[in-house]
Image (tube, rainbow, N blue to C red):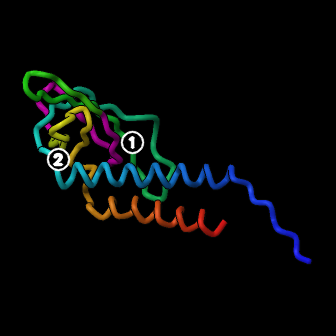
Protein backbone atom coordinates (compact mmCIF):
# COMPACT_ATOMS: atom_id res chain seq x y z
CA UNK A 1 0.00 0.00 0.00
CA UNK A 2 1.36 3.39 -0.97
CA UNK A 3 1.80 6.02 1.65
CA UNK A 4 0.53 9.47 0.87
CA UNK A 5 3.16 12.14 1.00
CA UNK A 6 2.51 14.95 3.37
CA UNK A 7 3.10 18.19 1.59
CA UNK A 8 3.87 21.36 3.41
CA UNK A 9 1.42 24.17 2.90
CA UNK A 10 4.12 26.69 3.86
CA UNK A 11 5.91 26.29 0.52
CA UNK A 12 2.68 26.83 -1.39
CA UNK A 13 1.96 29.97 0.60
CA UNK A 14 5.43 31.40 -0.01
CA UNK A 15 5.44 30.64 -3.75
CA UNK A 16 1.84 31.83 -4.03
CA UNK A 17 2.73 35.11 -2.34
CA UNK A 18 5.61 35.68 -4.74
CA UNK A 19 3.35 34.85 -7.72
CA UNK A 20 0.75 37.29 -6.41
CA UNK A 21 3.37 40.03 -6.11
CA UNK A 22 4.47 39.51 -9.74
CA UNK A 23 0.85 39.44 -10.91
CA UNK A 24 -0.05 42.60 -8.97
CA UNK A 25 3.00 44.50 -10.24
CA UNK A 26 2.31 43.41 -13.82
CA UNK A 27 -1.32 44.58 -13.52
CA UNK A 28 -0.19 47.89 -12.00
CA UNK A 29 2.30 48.58 -14.81
CA UNK A 30 -0.26 47.55 -17.44
CA UNK A 31 -2.86 49.87 -15.94
CA UNK A 32 -0.38 52.77 -15.86
CA UNK A 33 0.83 52.06 -19.39
CA UNK A 34 -2.62 51.75 -20.95
CA UNK A 35 -4.74 54.10 -18.84
CA UNK A 36 -2.25 56.37 -17.14
CA UNK A 37 -1.85 60.07 -17.76
CA UNK A 38 1.54 61.41 -18.84
CA UNK A 39 3.20 64.44 -17.32
CA UNK A 40 6.67 65.90 -16.89
CA UNK A 41 8.43 65.43 -13.56
CA UNK A 42 11.49 67.28 -12.27
CA UNK A 43 14.44 65.13 -11.18
CA UNK A 44 15.46 66.06 -7.64
CA UNK A 45 18.36 63.69 -6.87
CA UNK A 46 20.50 61.47 -9.04
CA UNK A 47 23.10 59.31 -7.32
CA UNK A 48 25.14 56.19 -7.94
CA UNK A 49 24.70 53.26 -5.57
CA UNK A 50 27.75 51.35 -4.42
CA UNK A 51 30.42 50.46 -6.97
CA UNK A 52 30.59 48.71 -10.28
CA UNK A 53 28.06 45.91 -10.74
CA UNK A 54 29.55 42.42 -10.62
CA UNK A 55 28.24 41.27 -13.99
CA UNK A 56 29.54 40.18 -17.38
CA UNK A 57 29.19 43.67 -18.88
CA UNK A 58 31.84 45.97 -17.45
CA UNK A 59 31.29 49.59 -16.38
CA UNK A 60 27.66 49.16 -15.36
CA UNK A 61 26.40 51.05 -12.32
CA UNK A 62 23.07 51.32 -10.52
CA UNK A 63 21.72 54.86 -10.30
CA UNK A 64 18.86 55.98 -8.08
CA UNK A 65 16.85 59.09 -8.82
CA UNK A 66 13.99 60.93 -7.13
CA UNK A 67 11.43 63.02 -8.97
CA UNK A 68 8.39 65.17 -8.25
CA UNK A 69 5.51 66.55 -10.26
CA UNK A 70 2.55 68.82 -9.58
CA UNK A 71 -1.09 67.97 -10.31
CA UNK A 72 -3.81 70.52 -9.44
CA UNK A 73 -1.46 72.42 -7.15
CA UNK A 74 -0.46 69.36 -5.11
CA UNK A 75 3.04 67.87 -5.35
CA UNK A 76 3.61 64.14 -5.75
CA UNK A 77 6.93 62.36 -5.74
CA UNK A 78 8.49 59.05 -6.62
CA UNK A 79 11.79 57.30 -7.15
CA UNK A 80 13.27 54.72 -9.45
CA UNK A 81 16.50 52.93 -10.35
CA UNK A 82 18.34 52.66 -13.60
CA UNK A 83 21.38 50.66 -14.74
CA UNK A 84 23.70 52.71 -16.92
CA UNK A 85 27.33 53.04 -17.83
CA UNK A 86 29.70 55.43 -16.08
CA UNK A 87 28.48 58.96 -16.45
CA UNK A 88 28.70 62.25 -14.67
CA UNK A 89 25.34 63.85 -14.04
CA UNK A 90 25.14 67.15 -12.24
CA UNK A 91 21.53 67.91 -11.41
CA UNK A 92 20.82 71.61 -11.41
CA UNK A 93 17.03 71.30 -11.16
CA UNK A 94 16.46 71.58 -14.89
CA UNK A 95 16.25 67.88 -15.75
CA UNK A 96 12.81 66.46 -16.54
CA UNK A 97 11.48 62.96 -17.22
CA UNK A 98 8.11 61.65 -18.39
CA UNK A 99 5.96 60.03 -15.71
CA UNK A 100 2.75 58.01 -15.99
CA UNK A 101 0.24 58.34 -13.13
CA UNK A 102 -3.31 57.27 -12.39
CA UNK A 103 -5.79 60.12 -12.70
CA UNK A 104 -7.74 58.96 -9.64
CA UNK A 105 -4.62 58.57 -7.50
CA UNK A 106 -1.49 60.42 -8.72
CA UNK A 107 0.52 58.94 -5.85
CA UNK A 108 0.55 55.72 -7.93
CA UNK A 109 3.07 56.65 -10.59
CA UNK A 110 6.05 55.32 -12.49
CA UNK A 111 8.62 56.76 -14.90
CA UNK A 112 8.02 56.07 -18.59
CA UNK A 113 11.33 54.16 -18.65
CA UNK A 114 9.69 51.40 -16.58
CA UNK A 115 7.57 50.49 -19.63
CA UNK A 116 10.49 50.22 -22.03
CA UNK A 117 10.74 47.60 -23.38
CA UNK A 118 7.01 46.90 -23.25
CA UNK A 119 7.46 43.12 -23.17
CA UNK A 120 8.89 43.49 -19.66
CA UNK A 121 5.28 43.68 -18.46
CA UNK A 122 4.54 40.36 -20.17
CA UNK A 123 7.50 38.80 -18.37
CA UNK A 124 5.94 39.67 -14.99
CA UNK A 125 2.74 37.89 -16.04
CA UNK A 126 4.69 34.88 -17.36
CA UNK A 127 6.61 34.51 -14.08
CA UNK A 128 3.32 34.63 -12.14
CA UNK A 129 1.82 31.94 -14.38
CA UNK A 130 4.88 29.67 -14.07
CA UNK A 131 4.86 30.02 -10.28
CA UNK A 132 1.12 29.27 -10.28
CA UNK A 133 1.83 26.11 -12.29
CA UNK A 134 4.42 25.03 -9.71
CA UNK A 135 1.89 25.53 -6.92
CA UNK A 136 -0.62 23.37 -8.74
CA UNK A 137 1.97 20.61 -9.22
CA UNK A 138 2.97 20.57 -5.53
Residue located at (46% from left, 35% from top)? 50
Please check the rendered image and state whether residue 113 is part of the magenta-colored stretch, yes or no. Answer: no
Residue located at (10% from left, 29% from top)? 71
Q: Is residue 112 left or right of residue 40?
A: right
Looking at the picture, does residue 62 appear above or below residue 29? above
| Secondary structure state at the residue bearing disc 1 | strand
Could you say which is closer to the camera, residue 136 or residue 53? 136
Could you say which is closer to the camera, residue 11 or residue 53? 11
> Which of the marked residues, 2 or 1, is nearer the chain's N terminus?
2
Tell whether label 1 touches label 2 (CB within 8 Å).
Answer: no
Identify the residue position indicated by label 2 in the image.
36
Number of numbered discs on residues: 2
Q: Main secondary structure of the magenta part?
A: loop
Residue at the front extreme, as displayed: 1
Residue located at (24% from left, 39% from top)? 109
State the extent of the magenta-drawn residues as a range: 79-96
Looking at the picture, does residue 21 appear above or below residue 106? below
Percent x, y of residue 94: 11, 29
Please tell me how crowded label 1 is: few (under 14), some (14-19), or many (20+) other residues with Cα within 10 Å.
Answer: some
Q: Is residue 89 left or right of residue 127?
A: left
Percent x, y of residue 58: 43, 53
Which disc, if any, is residue 28?
Answer: none
Please tell me how crowded label 2 is: few (under 14), some (14-19), or many (20+) other residues with Cα within 10 Å.
Answer: many
Quadrant the C terminus occupies: bottom right
Residue located at (13% from left, 22% from top)? 74
| Secondary structure state at the residue bearing disc 2 | loop
Identify the residue position indicated by label 1 in the image.
62
Q: Nearer the viewer, mark 2 or mark 1?
A: 2
Mark 2 to mark 1 CA distance (whole Å):
27 Å
Quadrant the N terminus occupies: bottom right
Which of the 4 image quadrants contains residue 98?
A: top left
Amino acid sequence: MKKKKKRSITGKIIIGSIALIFLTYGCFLSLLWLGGTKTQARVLNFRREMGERNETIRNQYTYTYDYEFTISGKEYSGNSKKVKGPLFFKNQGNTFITVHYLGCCPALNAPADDFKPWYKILIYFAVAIVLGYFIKRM
